Image: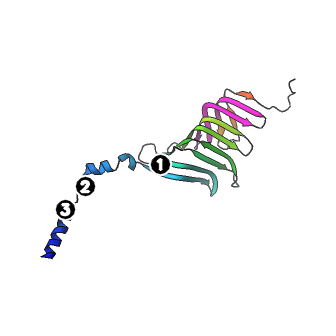
Amino acid sequence: MAKNILIFMLVAFLFSCENDIAEVEQAISKDELKYETMTNVELLYSDSAILKVKVQGPKMYRYLESKNPTQEFPEGIKVDFYDPLGRSQSVLTSKYAIRYEKKNEIMVKDSVVWKSKKKEKLETEELIWDEKQSKVYTKKFVKITRPGEIIHGYGFEANQDFTRWEINAITGRIKVDGLPDEK
């Protein structure tokens, strides 16, 4: 008799378990399934086993199920650029960044600062890094500070290691060798 009661309870238990689809969908938001959240992120980009770029951020969202997958850094980003010998040559920081995976393009915004080991500094509110063309650019206001120079302008374009660059609509104090001093 006890055996029959146990079997009856087991069968009743198995048939009483039911998941209503609406309840499951309500418990797990569809938006939660579309992205991954990562904290204390460090991404390394290399070419032929040589470190080129290190990206760090306190939080990253990786959006998976969209026509344009992205990696978003809502709490800021720090990017170190390295020379072929593995030495850091420059550092880029901003309060926000987003990478568009299909376009191979990264946009950094809000208090963007780039500093080189040569004491050069770029400040702007937005900068776009086109990975395919290996260049960075903006149409926004920029300020470049170098030893003895402060340059302002609207619009900036450079190769990704910032060794060649140009500014549109330029103003500022620029050091020119070989000119007589003004008196």
Label 2 to label 1: alpha-carbon separation: 30 Å
Q: Residue at x 68, y 31 (%)?
A: 167
Q: Amino acid at mark 2?
A: Asn
Q: Is residue 117 above or below residue 49?
A: above
The residue sitting at the top extreme is 183
Residue 1 picture location, percent across and down: 12, 76
Name the residue carrying label 1: 62
The residue sitting at the left extreme is 1
| The C terminus lies in quadrant | top right
Q: Is residue 104 left or right of residue 175?
A: left
Q: Residue at x 17, y 68 (%)?
A: 9
Residue 123 picture location, percent across and down: 65, 36
Instruction: For marks 3 and 1, give the one nearer the viewer.
Output: 3
Residue 142 or 51: which is nearer the viewer? 142
Colour setup of the view: rainbow
10 Å neighbourhood of mark 2: few (<14), some, or many (≥20)?
few
Q: How many marks?
A: 3
**Quarter of the view holding residue 182:** top right
Say whether marks 3 and 1 touch (CB < 8 Å).
no
Name the residue carrying label 3: 15
Name the residue carrying label 2: 19
Q: What residue span does the magenta drawing correspond to?
A: 128-156
10 Å neighbourhood of mark 1: few (<14), some, or many (≥20)?
some
Q: Residue at x 64, y 43 (%)?
A: 160
Residue 49 or 180: which is nearer the viewer? 180
Indicate whether residue 167 is drawn in magenta: no
Q: Specify which label sits upstream in the sequence, 3 or 1.
A: 3
Q: Is residue 180 above or below residue 25?
A: above
